[in-house]
């Protein structure tokens, strides 16, 4: 968090944000990376509290973290959870004499008999005079070496890197802090495909709808840097490629966290300094995390609408298996000059009422075919908020536009359409943007199979044959696009 002139008013504002009721709403400031524990999701924020979600979509208060302070992070190591946080600093209390501490817990569930935090251990500090402010820590357990790293710091000085012991959470003996970036705060480190990425929050915070927070990134082949952006600028000299900025009536994204849900399915978490539709409050943000040419950037959460659902396999369209009805058109001979001089008359799209009477009354199978702007190829996709959701989105219903005919999963692990949407679980769909920008479409349940479905997706078994099959990011058969045309 950035030092502002009126320290008292900023501190008061942050305390108010932390103490406001969060039940049923994702109000939080400086959230940690989202952690999963015993089927629930947790994120911790400034002030000591945090949020819990049973499904990844609906959040409420209740997460517990002692010690107060600001901007925590959490990481599961083995069968325990390591929590790191800044005890002071950031201009709170009048200075930049910060302290960063770690502590462990066997579980994040405050109702578990195993819920007990260990005594906090100081791993680094700043004296208020040096060119660093010990606050806003982020954790990385290097998957290639097993070494544990923490980055920290604010605009007051440099972003620093220290090494911790992954067994104790203490500072590695003799480890010297390294300066790796400037002009950012709330940093986080991630590793992917041979690269280390340093995510930093740039801009101003703690000013509601006037906050200019945004998240930038640089990368390095070594965890110790240097971290360069897409045009070769060193983050130690102010470089950084944009990952996410203000948009869609939310401003000030900061405090990046990455969660890998499945191969090719990732989300990023952050807070927005101000959600215009929530009275300008600071809220939890969850967005798809996409990758292009080795660089991460925020995708857009799917919002529904009326679309062609296009298979990535061939570019054909998901449609009802009904007879193709030809459209009437005044034919003109291109070789006759007099025909070319006639006034142009736009051709209207085929209307639903012109063809729906020829469709069967019961279930109609789905197929894939050439897109031709026909009613049996246009799908309206609508969130169903009362059905809950998953990490990053609500469940959706998918119906033929202008009707209530719904896409549904079957007991035979196939896909069909039923005459009426009833809200049954097999008619609800999970829609997630993949790291390459395409989507996977997954039924909430498969009739006859136990529990929530996390394996089977809408799948192009052939150019004209949709089915349900196990998700495989490495084949275009699992991938779909939504085209508004």
Image (cartoon, rainbow, N blue to C red):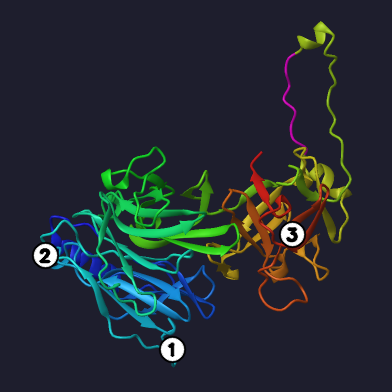
Residue situated in front as seen by the camera: 328 or 56: 56
State the SS at label 3.
Answer: strand
Q: Which residue is mark 3?
A: 406
- Of discs 3 and 1, which sits in the foreground? 1
* Residue 2 in the figure: left or right of residue 306: left
Query: On screen, 349 above or below 344?
Result: below
Q: Residue 106: x, y in percent? A: 43, 85
Q: Residues within 10 Å of mark 3 (few under 14, many from 20)?
A: many
Count of all numbered marks drawn on residues in the image: 3
Residue 315 picture quarter: top right
Q: CA distance from mark 3 to mark 2?
A: 59 Å
Looking at this rendering, what residue extends furthest in the bottom direction? 113
Residue 300 in view? no
Which badge, 3 or 1, is on the more N-terminal residue? Answer: 1
Q: Residue 259: x, y in percent? A: 49, 64
Q: Which residue is mark 2?
A: 94
State the SS at label 1.
Answer: loop
């Amino acid at each position: 968090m950035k030092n502002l002139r009126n320290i008292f008013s900023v501190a008061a504002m942050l305390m108010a944000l932390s103490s406001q009721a969060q039940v049923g709403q994702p109000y939080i400031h400086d959230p940690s990376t989202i952690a999963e524990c015993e089927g629930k999701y947790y994120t911790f924020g400034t002030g000591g509290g945090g949020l819990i979600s049973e499904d990844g979509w609906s959040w409420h208060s209740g997460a517990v973290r002692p010690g107060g302070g600001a901007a925590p992070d959490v990481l599961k190591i083995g069968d325990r959870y390591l929590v790191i946080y800044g005890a002071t600093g950031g201009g709170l209390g009048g200075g930049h004499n910060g302290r960063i501490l770690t502590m462990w817990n066997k579980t994040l569930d405050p109702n578990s008999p195993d819920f007990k935090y260990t005594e906090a251990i100081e791993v680094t500090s700043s004296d208020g005079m040096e060119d660093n402010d010990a606050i806003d820590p982020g954790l990385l357990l290097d998957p290639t070496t097993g070494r544990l790293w923490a980055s920290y710091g604010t605009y007051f000085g440099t972003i620093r890197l220290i090494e911790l012991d992954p067994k104790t959470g203490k500072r590695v003996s003799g480890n010297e802090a390294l300066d790796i970036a400037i002009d950012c705060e709330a940093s986080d480190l991630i590793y992917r495909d041979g690269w280390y990425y340093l995510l930093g929050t740039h801009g101003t915070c703690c000013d509601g709808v006037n906050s200019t927070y945004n998240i930038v990134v640089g990368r390095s082949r070594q965890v110790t840097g240097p971290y360069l952006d897409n045009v070769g600028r060193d983050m130690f000299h102010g470089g950084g490629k944009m990952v996410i900025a203000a948009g869609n009536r939310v401003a000030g994204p900061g405090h990046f966290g990455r969660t890998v849900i499945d191969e090719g399915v990732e989300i990023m978490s952050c807070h927005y300094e101000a959600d215009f539709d929530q009275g300008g409050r600071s809220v939890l943000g969850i967005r798809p995390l996409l990758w292009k040419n080795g660089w991460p950037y925020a995708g857009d959460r799917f919002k529904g609408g009326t679309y062609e659902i296009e298979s990535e396999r061939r570019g054909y369209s998901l449609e009802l298996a009904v007879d193709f009805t030809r459209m009437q058109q005044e034919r003109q001979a291109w070789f006759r000059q007099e025909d070319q001089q006639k006034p142009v008359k736009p051709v209207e799209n085929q209307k639903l009422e012109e063809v729906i009477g020829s469709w069967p009354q019961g279930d109609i199978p789905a197929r894939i075919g050439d897109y031709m702007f026909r009613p049996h190829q246009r799908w309206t996709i609508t969130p169903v908020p009362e059905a809950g959701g998953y990490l990053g989105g609500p469940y959706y219903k998918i119906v033929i536009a202008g009707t209530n005919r719904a896409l549904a999963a079957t007991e035979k692990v196939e896909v069909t359409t039923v005459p009426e949407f009833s809200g049954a679980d097999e008619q609800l769909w999970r829609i997630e943007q993949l790291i390459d920008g395409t989507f996977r479409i997954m039924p909430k349940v498969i009739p006859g199979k136990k529990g929530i479905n996390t394996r089977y997706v809408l799948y192009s078994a052939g150019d004209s044959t949709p089915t349900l099959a196990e998700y495989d990011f490495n084949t275009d058969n699992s991938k779909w696009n939504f085209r508004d045309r």
